[in-house]
Amino acid sequence: MILAVASGKGGTGKTTVALNLARAWGKPVQLLDCDVEEPNVHLFLDLAGTEREIVSIPVPEVDESLCDGCGECGKFCQYHAIVSFGTTPLIFAEMCHGCGGCALVCPRKAIREVKRRIGAVETARAGDIALVQGRLDVGSAMAPPLIREVKARLRPGLPAILDAPPGTSCPVVATLRGADFAALVTEPTPFGLHDLELAVETVREIGLPFGVVINRSGSGDDRVRDYCAGQNIPVLLEIPDDRRIAEAYSRGKLIVEALPEYLGIFRTLAEKLLSGAAAVPSAFSPLFSP
Amino acid sequence: MKVVFTTSGDNLDAPLDSRFGRAPKFLVYDLDAGTFETVDNRQNLNAAQGAGIQSAETVARLGAKALVTGHCGPNAFRVLTAAGIKVFTAEKATVAEALKKYRAGELTEAGSADVEGHWV
């Protein structure tokens, strides 16, 4: 079972939910930090055995002695990473998505691919949690290829939790693809609802079953709850607006460790979402209401 | 010879747009004929990235030899230079005023990009 924890809005508590589910599960689990632009899961874990692999993507290099300036490469590239006007093409490696199309369409085989480093994938362990995280290099904008490298380290047969980046753009889609279920974390505010609606559109487009986690429940209004009810979206969990949770977070502690009274609700949800047999929860009522 | 001006309007009295890559339109002025046409650049207004590069490609394909705009980023400048297009930056209110300055040779040619990528 692969569970993706996503949200439209940033700062709603994706990492908090992903980490606490992983810890509450209490059995071997993979935790993938797919927010490669600013991975933060590692801050909350006592990690051991960290290993690091550099990730590169192929970018074009032109042999000027072979190029006749036909411009086919530039016409092919959707990202303007290679540009030609009847001359040897200009290459903008930072724009290149590494698809290799320019080399394929070049009639004179003047283009070969060279590696360009975009970041690293790190693996480490913290008890039952096997962490995999991507770390995009500063100045690199190519998150999706690195996210795919993080996910390539998924081990079949072992449940996995993916901590997605915020938003609804390419990095989020790269994270959600291939997941079995998405937990969309939001907060009961107008911003939370607005961005939740975008996230719902995204997961529906991908065809992924999903439910909602309302964080800081009680701090705003009922609009998110009403929206979920109107759309028949299951509310998986409501985490109350409890100052002690924020205090624990600020010290890098997990909710289920600092406040054991929450362990049960996270464990129940982890069992529902991560047990392969449970398939997909259709519509269950909130496990916790403040 | 053709000169391209960045703008949001359709005529010479329209404002000169300070953006290059994400300018809504290009006004292409033919210095020999004294005529002009406008070309839509809206596809790049909403581009996630590569707007400067593609805008520079558009200007090159229009056959222009000079560009007058507010600011020009590094990628766009590289393409424009490779295409042999001179870049002039101006802080004029309208295309007509910028054109007048261009004709009088009062605009300075930019020797490099004057802003970082994604400055707006």
Image (cartoon, coloured by chain):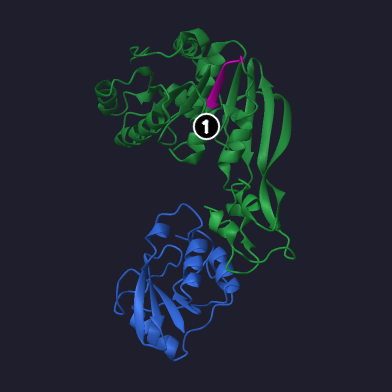
Chain colours: A green, B blue
The location of residue B53, given as percent across then percent down, is 52, 62
Which chain hosts label 1? A
Task: Find residue B39 and report its image quarter.
Answer: bottom left
Out of B65 and A237, give the one closest to the viewer: B65
User: Residue, x 54% and y 22% (percent of image)?
Assistant: A161
Q: Which residue is mark 1?
A: A175
Out of A74 and A276, give the one closest to the viewer: A74
Magenta stretch containing residue A160, yes or no?
A: yes
Magenta stretch: give its range: A157-162
Horizontal side of A281 relative to A249 (left or right) equals: left
Magenta stretch containing residue A135, yes or no?
A: no
Out of A93 and B72, give the one closest to the viewer: A93
Seen as rendered, the residue at the extreme front is A107
Residue A246 versus residue B19 in the image, above or below: above
Q: Can you say which quadrant of the picture contains the C terminus of chain A?
A: top left
Task: Find residue A135 and report its image quarter.
Answer: top right
The location of residue B114, given as percent across then percent down, is 53, 70
User: Residue, x 59% and y 65% (percent of image)?
Assistant: A84
Q: Residue B65, can we see it?
A: yes
The location of residue A148, given as percent across then percent down, is 59, 34
Circle 1: residue type? Thr
Residue A128 versus residue A117 in the image, above or below: above
Q: Secondary structure at mark 1?
A: helix
Q: Residues within 10 Å of mark 1 (few under 14, many from 20)?
A: many
The location of residue A3, given as percent across then percent down, is 50, 21
